[in-house]
Amino acid sequence: MEIFEFESFKGIALTPNESSNIINESLSTINCGRDKPDYINKFNNKIEIKFNNKIFEIDYDILKAHINRRSIILIDQGYQEAEIRTQTNYYKLVPLEGSNFVTLEINGIHMHRIKGISPIDDAKRKTSVAGVKKGTRVLEIGTGLGYTAISSLKLGAREVVTIEMDENVLWLAERNPWSRELNSEKIKIVLGNAIDVIKNFYNEFDIIIHDPPRFTSSTSMLYSSEFYRNLLSALKPNGILFHYTGEPGRVKGKSFPSRISSRLKSVGFRILRYDDIAMGIKAKKE
């Protein structure tokens, strides 16, 4: 298995709200609300920000223009927006309106729930429903920005193994201040396709949190009986699976969670319940 060595961004990340506060000389945070600068100065047409004994500079006009952008701006030796464009995909860190929380968009589609709940609170709910507690060993399918892995760690998990197949997503996670706790000895990020990686585990995990992308023809294997059998095999006896399904109407028809529950039962899981807030199924290996 290929292990991804996570390294947090050493520069500064700003939301549009933070850029606005800096321009307007208001008391400001940096790094998407997670830190305070040592000082901020304006001279000529430059903004100078000191943080962790290092001075970062950016043009005043660039920072002012960022106020009206829906993006995270990164400042290090130079500056750039936190985004990646490939031939097929457009990845972007996006601040939630009215807050400093950050979500991930791929091709304009949010990879987190943002209506009525923040991505971080959503992760807390999933890990709570799954029953993560002190000493548990957790497997997560789909690292994303790492919010679920980090939440598991905060609840006391002794180890979190998290699988992500897209290195572009992890590059953005490294630049997201809310993901910095992924840099932990207790979190192991496996770079690879979960369909293949899951076959390496047998009776190893107390809890599996399966948070797949929405159901499409290209992601259907993550919802297949074969994959569910491998999840069952990776769990210890009496281990728990939390399977995020989203809203019942997310796929045509309103029985999507019921169809998933039936498939899980067919491979040997016992369904415990569907959680309306976490929007997922809790099941048990017996």
Image (cartoon, helix red, strand yellow):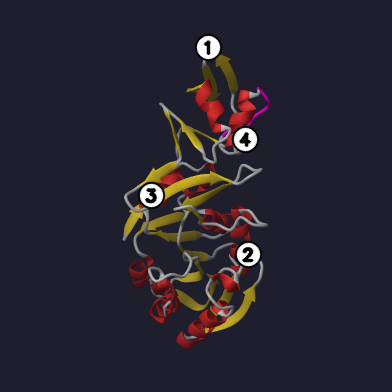
- Contact between marks 1 and 3 (CB within 8 A): the answer is no
Residue at the spot of label 4? 17
Q: Which residues are magenta?
A: 25-30
For image coordinates 68% across by 27% down, the residue present is 27
Alpha-carbon span between mark 1 and mark 3 = 37 Å
Nearer to the camera, 13 or 110: 110
For image coordinates 52% across by 23% down, the residue present is 61
Alpha-carbon span between mark 2 and mark 1 = 51 Å
For image coordinates 57% across by 80% down, the residue present is 255
Alpha-carbon span between mark 3 and mark 4 = 26 Å
Majority SS type along the magenta span: loop
For image coordinates 38% across by 49% down, the residue present is 168
Residue at the spot of label 1? 44
Alpha-carbon span between mark 4 and mark 2 = 31 Å
Q: Could you tell me residue 198's position as x and y percent?
A: 38, 70
Residue at the spot of label 2? 128
Q: Secondary structure at mark 1?
A: loop
